[in-house]
Image (cartoon, grey):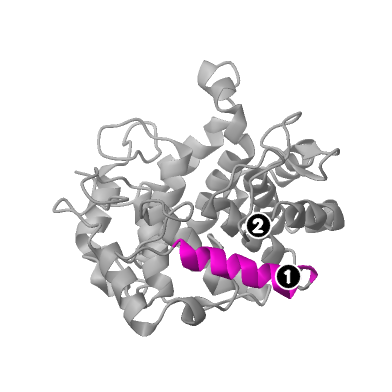
């Protein structure tokens, strides 16, 4: 089993992704293109290789995804605007220091138009709701420095909706009454953190219960699952750890076993990280595997902000650092 992060191989893997336009898979994943670029570029940042992709090409592609009718970004040129792709575009432009190229006023108007009477946000004009989209909206408004454009009444309705998604077992669901899921715990905790409302929604005992539910996601092989009785998956290394970092409970996870699991899911031939060992790698799991390693203090990586899922130094520069604590950065790998 590989016992170290294959950084150079992963950098090469990410660089190759945009050059495979003749592959059917490239076209079948067009609906995630802008998100995928964010995942790959952020993984490069965390591995200390943000120079591995061309800055001008990144900016050009983000701007080519502009939906002028909606005033926001789609996942691919000529796709309808969506809050997820809009957030990814904002994150990329901030990472390359080119946010001024975006029509921020129109984007803010688009985001605010998505809030529903219940307080939750829809993903787009078609009205699908999910706490993930609520997090994307709050994250985007915060990164744009435009939280002040959001009326206080709307903010309170949003907090109340998230409160109602908190379940008796400690987790959060995608909508009110939905099953607890680690990804939803992550986005709800991060949204509440940006809103400075964690302590307003969750009592100290509630926070302990959330932490306990998250820590129970670790399986004997070291990997984390998203809910009880499910398989382990590398991406939960971020979804679970980010919420535990906010709650200052990362030590509740067996670090060494999780590091070993993430490293075992690397493709040692072509690069990239898969959902679990011996599966096909993809940029989504590559990003969230690297993100998890960063929060675990893996040596040689750049600090990741678990609230915004962006380089911590950039978030601090923007003055947006919130409550979270990663494990200390190790000088050398322990596994």
Q: Is the magenta stretch mostly helix, strand or loop?
A: helix
Closer to the camera in the image, 61 or 152: 152
Q: In which quarter of the image is the C terminus?
A: bottom left
Pointer 2 local density, CA inside 10 Å: few below 14, some 14–19, many at least 20: many
Q: Mark 1 — residue?
A: 147
Total numbered labels placed on residues in the image: 2
Q: Which mark is residue 137?
A: 2
Give percent across and percent down for residue 334. Answer: 22, 64
Q: Does the magenta stretch include residue 157?
A: yes
Give percent across and percent down for residue 168. Answer: 32, 66
Q: In which quarter of the image is the N terminus?
A: top left
Secondary structure beneath dot 2 equals: helix
> Which mark sits nearer the N-terminus, 2 or 1?
2
Q: In this view, does 23 lie to the left or right of 94?
A: left
Between the C-alphas of marks 2 and 1, the distance is 10 Å
**Residue 303 visible in the displayed image:** no
Closer to the camera in the image, 17 or 203: 203
- Residue 162 lies, with reference to residue 19, above or below; the image says below
Residue at x-position 76% and y-position 28%: 78
Give percent across and percent down for residue 153. Answer: 71, 72
Magenta segment boundaries in residue numbering: 149-165
């Amino acid at each position: 089993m590989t016992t170290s992060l294959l950084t150079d191989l992963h950098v090469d893997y990410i660089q190759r992704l945009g050059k495979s336009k003749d592959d059917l898979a490239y076209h079948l994943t067009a609906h995630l293109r802008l998100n995928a670029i964010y995942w790959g570029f952020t993984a490069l940042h965390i591995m200390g290789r943000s120079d591995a992709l061309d800055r001008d090409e990144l900016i050009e592609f983000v701007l080519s995804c502009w939906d002028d009718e909606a005033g926001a970004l789609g996942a691919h040129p000529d796709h309808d605007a969506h809050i997820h792709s809009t957030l990814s575009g904002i994150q990329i432009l901030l990472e390359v220091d080119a946010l001024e190229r975006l029509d921020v006023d129109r984007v803010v108007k688009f985001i605010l138009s998505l809030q529903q009477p219940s307080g939750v946000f829809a993903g787009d004009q078609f009205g699908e709701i999910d706490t993930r989209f609520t997090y994307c909206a709050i994250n985007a408004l915060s990164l744009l420095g435009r939280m002040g454009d959001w009326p206080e009444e709307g903010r309170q309705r949003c907090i109340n909706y998230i409160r109602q998604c908190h379940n008796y077992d400690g987790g959060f669901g995608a909508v009110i009454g939905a099953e607890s899921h680690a990804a939803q715990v992550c986005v709800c905790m991060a949204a509440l953190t940006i809103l400075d409302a964690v302590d307003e929604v969750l009592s100290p005992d509630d926070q302990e219960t959330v932490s306990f539910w998250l820590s129970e996601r670790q399986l004997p092989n070291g990997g984390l699952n998203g809910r009880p009785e499910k398989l382990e998956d590398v991406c939960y290394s971020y979804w679970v750890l980010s919420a535990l970092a906010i709650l200052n409970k990362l030590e509740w996870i067996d670090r060494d076993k999780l590091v070993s699991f993430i490293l075992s899911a690397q493709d040692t031939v072509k690069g990239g990280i898969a959902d679990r060992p011996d599966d096909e790698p993809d940029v989504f799991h590559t990003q969230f595997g690297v993100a998890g390693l960063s929060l675990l203090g893996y040596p040689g990586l750049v600090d990741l902000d678990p609230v915004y899922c962006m380089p911590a130094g950039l978030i601090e520069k923007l003055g947006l650092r919130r409550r979270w604590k990663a494990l200390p950065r190790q000088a050398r790998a322990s596994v």
